[in-house]
Image (spheres, grey):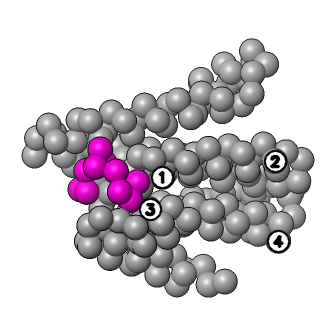
Amino acid sequence: MASKDSEVQSSGAHPHSWLDTWTTAFWETICREWSSIDQWRMNKILLLVRFFLRDLFEIELMSACHKASAAAHDSKDMISRQIHILESWPLSPRDRKVPDGLRLHVLDIWVDELTGQINTVQKELSQSDDSNPETTETVCLDVAKSFMVPLEKVSRDALSKGVKIRAKEALKLFQEQFPS
């Protein structure tokens, strides 16, 4: 991802313009192949999904927090596009193209990965002298809250009772870690 990002930036195109296509292709492929994954490879796929979410959160949080004042609109637009993709694929509450097993796994790891990336970004930005810690924390928390919106929709609208319960548990965990 980093090499593709530097390639796009050197050509003068919009940074992260490739991310939407990459994210959609990843989720579409995982959903399509989910039922054919054998028991010996499932742990690897689950770990791949975890790493993918971790990197996605890192890209979004770093982009939003580094550009807290300058290009906030571009960052919000990129985040809203990614949230739309996530709502269409792994956190689609009613679409049967997404297996419930994948939904449950994503809900299990969502808050852990988001929290981890928030802490990492805040730590990195606090070590650099060119950012205001209060502004950075506020921006990171706002981005994190926007990433919790799909979970709220799943907790209300999911077809499976198990998915609804897991989404409510994830929301509760997030609220415990980041009380408003």
Which callout, 4 or 3, points to the residue nearer the camera?
A: 3
- Looking at the image, residue 97 lies above or below residue 112: above
CA–CA distance between discs 4 and 2? Answer: 20 Å
Q: Amino acid type of disc 1?
A: Glu
Tell me the amino acid under the disc marked 3: Trp
Residue holding disc 2: 73
User: What is the CA distance from the residue labelled 1 to the residue labelled 3?
Assistant: 13 Å
* Residue placed furthest toward the left: 39
* Span highlighted in magenta in the image: 92-101
> Along the horizontal axis of the image, is 123 left or right of 54?
right
Residue 110: assigned label: 3
Residue 107 placement: quadrant: bottom left
Residue 81 as seen in the image, left or right of residue 36: right
Residue 8 is situated, as x and y percent measured from the top left of the image, at 68, 21
SS assignment at label 4? helix
Going from N to C along the chain, the mark reached first, 3 or 2, is: 2
Residue 88: % across, % down: 45, 47
In terms of secondary structure, where does tag 2 sit? helix
Query: Pointer 1: what residue?
Result: 87
For the residues labelled 4 and 1, the Cα–Cα distance comes to 30 Å
Above or below, comparing residue 20 to residue 88 in the picture: above
Give the alpha-carbon distance from disc 4 to disc 3, as whole Å: 25 Å
Asked if residue 55 can be seen in this view, the reply is no
Q: Is residue 13 above or below residue 108?
A: above
Distance CA(mark 3)–CA(mark 2): 25 Å
Question: Mark 3 and mark 4 in contact (Cβ < 8 Å)?
Answer: no
